[in-house]
Image (spheres, rainbow, N blue to C red):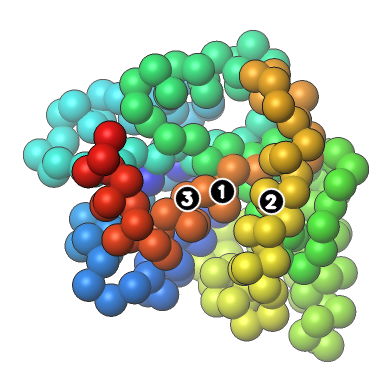
């Protein structure tokens, strides 16, 4: 189960990705993607309650959320609460668009979420040779990234960013995203099942 803070951007991305997951994966059959429009703390509470009330038995639960303009306390507490309730976090600091941008280049300096749009537009124009205007709720974003970006490089770059930080002050980890952990899990379902069975 993937529950997203955003109502459109993240769910649209994961819906596009779902079509490219390994055939026969349990994840395909069971994946629920829900956008909520809730803040980080209420997203975790919603995830806990949704999972409890659901008729479906989920092997894994993921919460996808951004640092955005939430306080350090809200952001860090959400991650702690999620981990205490066996909810995996694919958070981004400062915005989910960092994950998109890592498909094209490594970003090592923190930036405002407002800056991601112009960076994405520039990079997609550079690699596609066409003018591009980023739309936050674009249903074709996964396809666009697949056609012009490099997911393996995005994962490698995200790992490099994550390796810079080794404390629990997640709100200060900028730029950083853990979306790659969810992506790797989705594309390696057998490994995930084996890991779950060993826990």
Q: Is residue 177 above or below residue 15?
A: above
- Locate the C terminus by quadrant: top left
The part of the image, by quadrant, that contains residue 197 is: top left
The part of the image, by quadrant, that contains residue 174 is: top right
Q: CA distance from mark 3 to mark 2?
A: 12 Å
Q: Which mark sits nearer the N-terminus, 3 or 2?
A: 2
Q: Is residue 158 above or below residue 118?
A: above
Q: Are marks 1 and 3 in contact (CB under 8 Å)?
A: yes
Q: Residues within 10 Å of mark 1 (few under 14, many from 20)?
A: many
- Residue 93 image position (x, y, % from top left): 70, 36
Q: Residues within 10 Å of mark 3 (few under 14, many from 20)?
A: some
Q: Residues within 10 Å of mark 2 (few under 14, many from 20)?
A: many
Tag of residue 179: 1
Picture residue at 78% right of the left edge, 74% below the top: 124
Label 1: element kind: helix
Outermost residue toward the right in this view? 109
Q: Which residue is mark 2?
A: 158
Label 3: element kind: helix
Q: Nearer the viewer, residue 184 or 119?
A: 184
Picture residue at 69% right of the left edge, 80% below the top: 148
Q: Which residue is mark 3?
A: 182
Q: Are marks 2 and 1 in contact (CB under 8 Å)?
A: yes
Q: Which mark sits nearer the N-terminus, 2 or 1?
A: 2
- Residue 71 image position (x, y, % from top left): 69, 16
- Residue 102 image position (x, y, % from top left): 73, 59
């Amino acid at each position: 189960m993937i529950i997203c803070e955003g109502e459109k951007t993240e769910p649209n991305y994961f819906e596009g990705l779902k079509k490219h997951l390994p055939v026969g994966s349990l994840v395909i059959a069971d994946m629920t993607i829900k956008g909520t429009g809730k803040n980080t703390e209420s997203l975790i509470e919603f995830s806990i309650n949704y999972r409890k009330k659901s008729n479906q038995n989920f092997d894994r639960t993921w919460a996808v959320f951004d640092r955005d303009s939430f306080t350090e306390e809200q952001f860090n507490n959400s991650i702690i609460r999620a981990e205490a309730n066996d909810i995996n976090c694919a958070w981004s600091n400062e915005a989910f668009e960092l994950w998109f941008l890592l498909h094209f280049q490594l970003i090592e300096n923190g930036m405002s979420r407002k800056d991601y749009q112009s960076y994405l537009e520039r990079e997609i124009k550079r690699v596609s040779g066409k003018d591009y205007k980023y739309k936050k709720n674009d249903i074709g974003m996964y396809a666009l990234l697949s056609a012009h970006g490099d997911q393996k490089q995005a994962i490698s770059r995200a790992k490099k960013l994550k390796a810079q930080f080794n404390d629990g002050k997640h709100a200060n980890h900028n730029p950083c995203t853990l979306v790659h952990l969810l992506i790797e899990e989705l594309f390696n379902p057998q490994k995930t099942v084996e890991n779950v069975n060993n826990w």
